[in-house]
Image: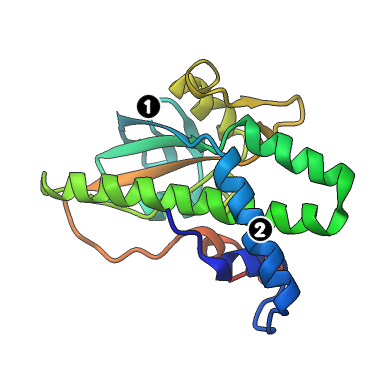
Amino acid sequence: MEIDRKEVYRYLGYGTHPVDEETRKLAETCIEELDRAADHKVLMREFPLTITEDGLIDGGCFRTKSKNLSKNLGGCGQVLVMAVTLGAGVDRLLARYGRLSVAKAVVMQAAAAAMVEAWCNEVCTGWKQDYETKGLYLRPRFSPGYGDFSLSCQEQILNGLEAGKRIGITLTEGGLMMPSKSVTAVIGVSPHKEFCHVEGCEACTKTDCLYRR
């Protein structure tokens, strides 16, 4: 799995600014340590999808109203519900450097964020290829918290996947996922191949975000 270094630097807030050599070396060190600590796990289930006239999205294990997600899933008859995690070892590594080195902790957080995105990309590419052999096409993944897709669906998705029992992802009382480097998302399945770019920053209305692509 190849981690996009540009994503690491984006999470560090560099934007279009050049990255100094010291930061580059530190990022490589962090990526090497993360590779050793990570325990990549994934869950995915397919559910029937219904979008009612009043805008209610029923994805089998979750129900919500979201204009952004409705647009993303338009024309789809099924939805894939996914959860991935880098595991508790990465959290322990992040906590360790949080105590020992502020600078390294910041870079480690950025590298871990880029790593979990790379892991999502890898598994989604595999599913895309599998579904296309059946004449079906996947939309870009869409996570709770993007656009107007409520974060409250996080709990529904994790429960529907039995993620706590199966790969150890739980929610804190404040609604944060543990392990922290975990992602949930839904992916529309369509019989039609259509261009759809609504994903991540493109679906977010916070245009002044420091980490925007």
Q: Which residue is mark 2?
A: 29
Q: Is residue 152 visible?
A: yes
For badge 2, the amino acid type reads: Thr
Q: Is residue 79 left or right of residue 36?
A: left
189 sits to left or right of 165: left
Check disc 1 and report its element: helix, strand or loop. Answer: loop
| Residue 13 drawn at (x, y percent) | 72, 70
Using a 10 Å C-alpha cutoff, classify the residue at mark 2 as few (fewer than 14 neighbours), some (14 to 19) or many (20 or more).
some
Q: Nearer the viewer, mark 2 or mark 1?
A: 2
- Look at 31% across and 35% down and name the residue there: 49
* Helix, strand or loop at mark 2: helix
Q: How many marks?
A: 2
Between 163 and 48, the one nearer to me in the picture: 163
Which is more N-terminal, label 1 or label 2? 2
- Quadrant containing the C terminus is bottom right
| Residue at x 19%, y 59% (from the top left corner) | 193
> What residue appears at the point 44 percent right and 37 percent down from the top-left corner?
56
Amino acid at pointer 1: Gly
* Disc 2 from disc 1: Cα separation: 42 Å
Residue 155 image point, x, y percent? 58, 27
Residue nearest the viewer, comparing 14 with 189 = 14
Front residue (pair 99, 140): 99
* Disc 1: which residue: 60
Q: Is residue 198 above or below residue 112?
A: below
Residue 51 visible in this rendered orientation of the protein: no
Residue 54 appears at what percent x and percent y? 43, 41
